[in-house]
């Protein structure tokens, strides 16, 4: 089967790779000159397999008014005269119910654990250099009540295979001395020893290069897709700048751009861009100022991960931003908050970045056959977990397209 995969971010490249490995003839198309140039470029770097609880949770709605009134809020909302935005926000509010959040968490864990296992098998077969670390993760809490509340989530996730421990402040500092800068504000942490980290862009580039060596794969870059031509309920051609591409199946791994491609076909998907920011801070050899273990500052929603000789810091959710331009005020706020937690960290050489995360209201990606055409497939909506979920999403999608045994129940992720 000839499969055209549109989108060369981490989700698209992994999809193309696993489809090619399954024996399909694959053509990967992207508008950029290189892979991972958009949302996969400088994200948080955490492979957070055991912590995939969706943003929509039972405590979120009560926190939103306070966040919106604070200048240092991790969430910023810009209302637009856009029915899609308000529809997405309503669906998000409904997804904040405890029963929905618990079900979504359980379903996401099945996908994330699949992704972890597939990633490990991939790394046994391929030599991919992306600063991969298996150094665990700490979710640091400043509020004792929130730490106690987190115990319930630890217990719930343990039922689904997660191995986590609740640490007090002293135990946390013994494990990660760099958190001493938080001083008396540190209540404790959740420690997950199995979590991993790496550079998403480097991973995507390495797998892209490997894909290019396969005899049944072709990568056509700098080639924007303008539309999908449908006849008789099937996509018969992908319209691109360099000409039409015919394929037996078409995969959209196009993130936020998916809606523009589906709209002429009469299909809409509940995707909305959540803008996030990151800083890449160069580290000197032997640096002990930055954390060696991946850290999430829970109340401030800031994540820290070592990626080679760089500390990647990612944070913030801006709802209503139309582009990925860097807002200097948001970057200044992020630097100030980082300096408060790690006062000895030198941020003068920090490189800022912003990207749009393609998110669904429930936080669950959409993986499977599109309603718009019988041979059109979607692999979209991984949000801030694109790196974490990419391998599992690609494995699930390629199994559905190939008609082979499915690695998990696809129903929770069906478009």
Image: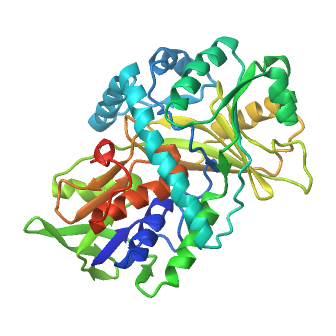
Q: Above or below — where is 261 with respect to 89? A: below
Along the horizontal axis of the image, is 153 left or right of 136?
A: left
Residue for point 44% across, 47% down: 111
Residue that protrudes farthest toward the left in the picture: 232
Q: In which quarter of the image is residue 375?
A: bottom left
Residue 55: x and y in percent read 48, 31
In the rendered view, would you say 292 is above or below 374? above
Residue 402 x %, y %: 29, 68
Residue at 23% x, 55% y is 370
Residue 33 is situated, as x and y percent measured from the top left of the image, at 51, 74
Is residue 389 found left or right of 46 in the rendered image?
A: left
Q: Which of 399 and 275 is in front in this view?
A: 399
Instruction: Work out whether residue 94 or residue 111 is closer to the camera in this orientation and state it.
Output: 111
Looking at the picture, the colour scheme in use is rainbow
Is any atom of residue 108 visible in this view? yes
The number of numbered badges drawn on the structure is 0
Residue closer to the observer: 331 or 258: 258
């Amino acid at each position: 089967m000839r499969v055209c995969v549109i989108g060369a971010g981490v989700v698209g490249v992994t999809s193309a790779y696993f489809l090619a490995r399954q024996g399909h003839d694959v053509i990967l198309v992207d508008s950029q000159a290189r892979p991972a140039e958009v949302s996969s470029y400088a994200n948080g770097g955490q492979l957070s397999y055991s912590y995939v609880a969706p943003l929509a949770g039972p405590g979120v709605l009560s926190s939103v008014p306070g966040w919106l009134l604070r200048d240092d809020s991790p969430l910023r909302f810009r209302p637009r005269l856009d029915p899609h935005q308000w529809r997405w926000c309503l669906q998000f509010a409904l997804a904040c119910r405890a029963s929905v959040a618990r079900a979504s968490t359980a379903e996401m864990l099945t996908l994330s654990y699949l992704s972890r296992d597939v990633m490990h098998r991939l790394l046994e077969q391929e030599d991919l250099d992306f600063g991969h670390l298996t150094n665990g993760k700490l979710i640091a809490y400043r509020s004792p009540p929130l730490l106690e509340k987190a115990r319930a989530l630890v217990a719930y996730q343990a039922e689904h295979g997660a191995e986590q421990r609740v640490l007090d402040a002293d135990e946390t500092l013994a494990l990660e001395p760099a958190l001493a800068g938080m001083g008396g504000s540190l209540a404790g942490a959740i420690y997950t020893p199995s979590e991993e980290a790496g550079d998403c862009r480097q991973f995507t580039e390495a797998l892209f290069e490997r894909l290019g060596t396969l005899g049944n794969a072709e990568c056509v870059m700098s080639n924007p897709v303008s539309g999908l031509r449908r006849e008789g309920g099937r996509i018969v051609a992908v319209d691109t700048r360099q000409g039409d591409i015919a394929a037996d199946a078409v995969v959209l791994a196009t993130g936020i751009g998916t809606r523009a491609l589906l709209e002429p076909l009469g299909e809409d998907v509940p995707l909305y861009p959540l803008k996030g920011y990151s800083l890449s801070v160069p580290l000197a050899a032997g640096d002990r100022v930055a954390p060696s273990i991946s850290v999430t500052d829970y109340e401030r929603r800031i994540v820290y991960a070592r990626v080679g000789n760089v500390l990647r810091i990612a944070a913030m959710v801006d709802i209503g931003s139309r582009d990925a331009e860097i807002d200097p005020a948001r970057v200044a706020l992020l630097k100030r908050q980082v300096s408060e937690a790690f006062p000895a960290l030198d941020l003068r050489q920090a490189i800022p970045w912003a990207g749009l995360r393609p998110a669904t209201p429930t936080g669950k990606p959409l993986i499977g056959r599109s309603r718009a055409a019988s041979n059109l497939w979607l692999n979209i909506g991984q949000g801030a977990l694109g790196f974490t979920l990419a391998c599992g999403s690609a494995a699930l999608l390629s199994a559905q397209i190939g008609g082979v045994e499915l690695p998990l129940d696809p129903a929770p992720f069906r478009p």
